[in-house]
Image (cartoon, rainbow, N blue to C red):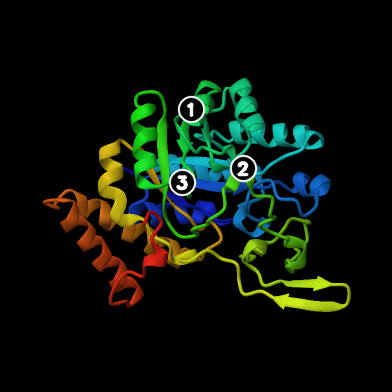
Amino acid sequence: MKIMAPLSNEAANEVRLLVESGADEFYCGYIPLYWRETNGVYSANRRGYGSSVHRLEELSHAISQAHDVGARLYVTVNEKYVACQREDVLRVLKDIRDANADGVIAGDIAVVLLCAELGLPVHAGTGCINLNTNSVLHVAGLGARRVVLDRVLTVSEIEMIAHGSAGTVELEVFILNAKCGNIEGCCSFSHTLSECVPEVSVPDGRIAKRHVPDIVWCGSSFEVEHGNERMRESERVMCPGGGLACGACRIWEFSRFGITGCRVVGRNYGLPQRVSDVRFIRKCCDILSVSANQEAFQAMCRREYCARHDLKECPPGRCYYA
């Protein structure tokens, strides 16, 4: 099973270390400066400006770095777009093609169709609402070579989809971090509001390279008001497990279902955490080859998870596929 690892706005400088840690494939965001001129704070993908590459030459360099070490790199174009953004989206896709990327991860059926027109390999991300066999076969018929299954699916549902689509299209599952109870394709929350985060300007006008933390609206506190009266102040609305969610102990089943890849989430995380995450999932994949049975494999994975988080046992709420 291939490990799909996240890259940040420093993508080219991260590839080799993450490959050495166990990554097989990469995904990153690309938000060129011309996108911001016409779209403001509205991101070109589901992360912010601080988690994406901004210059075509930087994207090309990152892709070259990945290819030099035998890895593939896919670029996320996975927001929901409106008609007036079509030309900008098309320009972004042409940039990605010119940079020699291995493909696009799309979050919109329209982007899947545009990629087919441009001859760009495309994966249908969770924004395409991949919840059952028919939806998977549908996007495959539109040109998707791989389908990323939604986080809300159970292991048994994933098994049914894998059997129903076998030989037709590759499948990918989430395996670590950022568990969300929402159906992503039906979610209208903005994950970022980058204008609220200061940036460093440099003489030639480009956006300076620095890590800008994403603002996650669906994980923020909020207040409910009626007129001038505050009725309730919420707790954080993150799902149980949130950023520490893990599905590593299910790799045993996924490998037998024929799942192609597992994704580590975290384009907006620091490099040390991403390296640690990839090493952990690689170790779990290696454990797979020496485990006598599923129970033994799961026990070993859980011990590894608890050791890295200094826990006595896995908290049930952190399990992606409980």
Give the residue displayed 79% in from the left and 78% down from the top: 230
- On the question of residue 209 being in view, the answer is no
Count of labels in the image: 3
Horizontal side, residue 105 vs residue 89: left or right: left
User: Label 2 neighbourhood size at 10 Å, few (<14), some (14-19), many (20+)?
Assistant: many
> Judging from the image, what secondary structure is the residue with disc 1 in?
helix
- On the question of residue 73 being in view, the answer is yes
> Judging from the image, what secondary structure is the residue with disc 2 in?
loop
Split into 4 quadrants, where in the image is the N terminus? top left
Real-space CA distance between mark 3 and mark 2, rounded to the nearest whole angstrom: 15 Å
**Does residue 268 sit above or below 66 in this rendering?**
below
Marks 3 and 2, the one that precedes in the sequence: 3
Give the residue displayed 88% in from the left and 77% down from the top: 228
Q: Which residue is mark 1?
A: 134
Marks 3 and 1, the one that precedes in the sequence: 3
Q: Which residue is mark 2?
A: 78
| Kind of residue at disc 1 | Asn
> Judging from the image, what secondary structure is the residue with disc 3 in?
strand
Give the residue displayed 21% in from the left and 62% down from the top: 299
> Could you say where residue 106 lies in the image, as x and y percent from the top left?
58, 37
Q: Which residue is mark 3?
A: 26
